[in-house]
Amino acid sequence: MGTGVATPGDLASCRRELAAALPADALLADPADLRTYECDGLTGFRVQPALVVLPRSTSEVAACVAACHRHRIPFVARGAGTGLSGGALPVADGVVIGLARMRDVLEIDSANARMRVQPGVTNAEISTHAAPLGLYYAPDPSSQVVCTIGGNVAENSGGAHCLKYGFTVNHVLAVTMVTADGTILEFGDDCADRIGPDLLALIVGSEGTLGIVTEVTVRLLPKPAAVRTLVADFAAVAQAADTVSEIIAAGIVPAAVEMMDKLAIAAVEKGVRAGLSTRAEAILIIEVDGFAGQCDEDFAAIREICAAHGATAVHIPADAAERALIWQGRKAAFASMGQISPDYFVQDGVIPRTKLTPVLDRIAEMAREADLAVANVFHAGDGNLHPLVLYDARIPDQAERAEQLSTAIAELCVDAGGSLSGEHGIGTDKACSMPRMFSEIDLAAMDRVRAAFDPDGLCNPGKVLPTPRLCGERPGPYRPHPIETAGLAGRG
């Protein structure tokens, strides 16, 4: 592939140019500051960048990128750092362009139900600003209170309610993007039917490899008139999985269908105390929304299907506060794993709904073979699995075995007719598995598209597409040196 890490250029000259283009507090070079940016949510992979810059506007981003381009310095855009695939992993001799200070809401167009924001605005903040108008933003990643819309665009993020409403790509109308040479371009518009190739859809989900998005116009939706939620307990994971398939086969499209297994429930109840049953082997959280009459009809049918598949209990929250607590528990599932394991890898494969049971059974077998535990919490309605491989990095070889199991699970999803990723992206974590899903011709075509935007390979290099350097010298889980463990030194 032609878009690996570029040969480093003149970093000192680039630094001087960046310092001249930005306010004094917008350039970080102290090693203590740089350590904050050495990884994203995939904390097993760590690389300390040479510099971090914190622009506040599209023009400042363009100046930073132009300087990097002139001096052949690779750069990586970073939002809130909540990504789970190593997509914001820095380059050792490169620059991180942090967008966290770009947090302005630029325009709210209530008549046309849209909002234009900078990339550092969080997912939840969009709905907060839209709420007084009776509107909201539908995609809702579990990290929505901290993850930013720029990162959502990069990864084409989803969330629990994307079963009915679609992913980020279905809710982005336009973006402003700085390309790899510092040029400012706009993609998308207000038209419902666009003419020509849909370059906007190409950018959404490109994981920051084509440029840096600095403004996003999102579609807002009216708040639903009615919302109904239930939690169904099951004595077997297979019963819960079969229930999901039958609900969809019945022609019902809930707003959300989430599944958690016993291990995930135990972690959530220790961390959040959401009132979920720790006796159940699996639970489904099912929500319908829309007009009241249709909600009631669908809700009744769903309850009947749950009962027919052996639900041991069906709990309906008494009020909005209890419903919010249930969703708080589901969305805190990843963070709650710290209650039962010191470390974990989270995977993000997609499979056909009808294969939920055999794939989950195989994951359990693989976990036993690796002598590791796997907790499952996922968007069951669209087959987007999030197996969490639990391990303890202090125990020799556990990190390696956990990483191998995590990769094997992702590739199992491909073998089952699915995908390596549903919403977390490929990043660094799964780039070397891309040949499992795509042919050499496919990957070469993707590389040509990427090179059309970034011929020098400076923009988020080493991500998404496999390269000999990446797959031959994977950074692997971070392991502290014995001197560091003894407290005699730290990473500089």
Image (cartoon, rainbow, N blue to C red):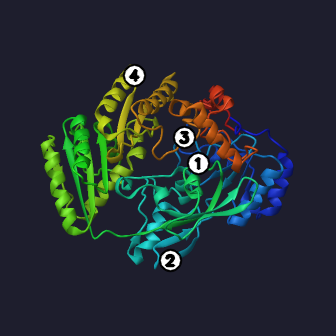
Could you tell me how far apart the alpha carbons at marks 3 and 2 are, in whole angstroms?
34 Å
Amino acid marked by disc 1: Glu
Could you tell me how far apart the alpha carbons at marks 1 and 2 are, in whole angstroms?
28 Å
Could you tell me how far apart the alpha carbons at marks 1 and 3 are, in whole angstroms?
8 Å
Q: Is residue 172 left or right of residue 62?
A: left
Amino acid marked by disc 4: Asp
Contact flag, marks 1 and 3 (Cβ < 8 Å): yes
Q: For mark 2, what is the residue?
A: 109
Q: For mark 4, what is the residue?
A: 371
Front disc: 4 or 3: 3
Front disc: 4 or 1: 1
For the question of whether residue 186 can be seen, the reply is: yes
Amino acid marked by disc 2: Asp
Could you tell me how far apart the alpha carbons at marks 2 and 4 are, in whole angstroms?
54 Å
Contact flag, marks 4 and 1 (Cβ < 8 Å): no
**Of pointers 1 and 2, the one earlier in the residue sequence:** 2
Q: For mark 3, what is the residue?
A: 426
Q: Quadrant of the N terminus?
A: top right
**Of pointers 4 and 1, the one earlier in the residue sequence:** 1
Q: For mark 1, what is the residue?
A: 207
Mark 4 neighbour class, 10 Å CA radius: few under 14, some 14 to 19, many 20 or more: few
**Of pointers 2 and 4, the one earlier in the residue sequence:** 2
Quarter location, residue 336: top left
Outermost bottom residue: 111
Q: Is residue 97 left or right of residue 12?
A: left
Q: Secondary structure at mark 1?
A: loop
Outermost front residue: 196
**Of pointers 3 and 2, the one earlier in the residue sequence:** 2
**Of pointers 1 and 3, the one earlier in the residue sequence:** 1
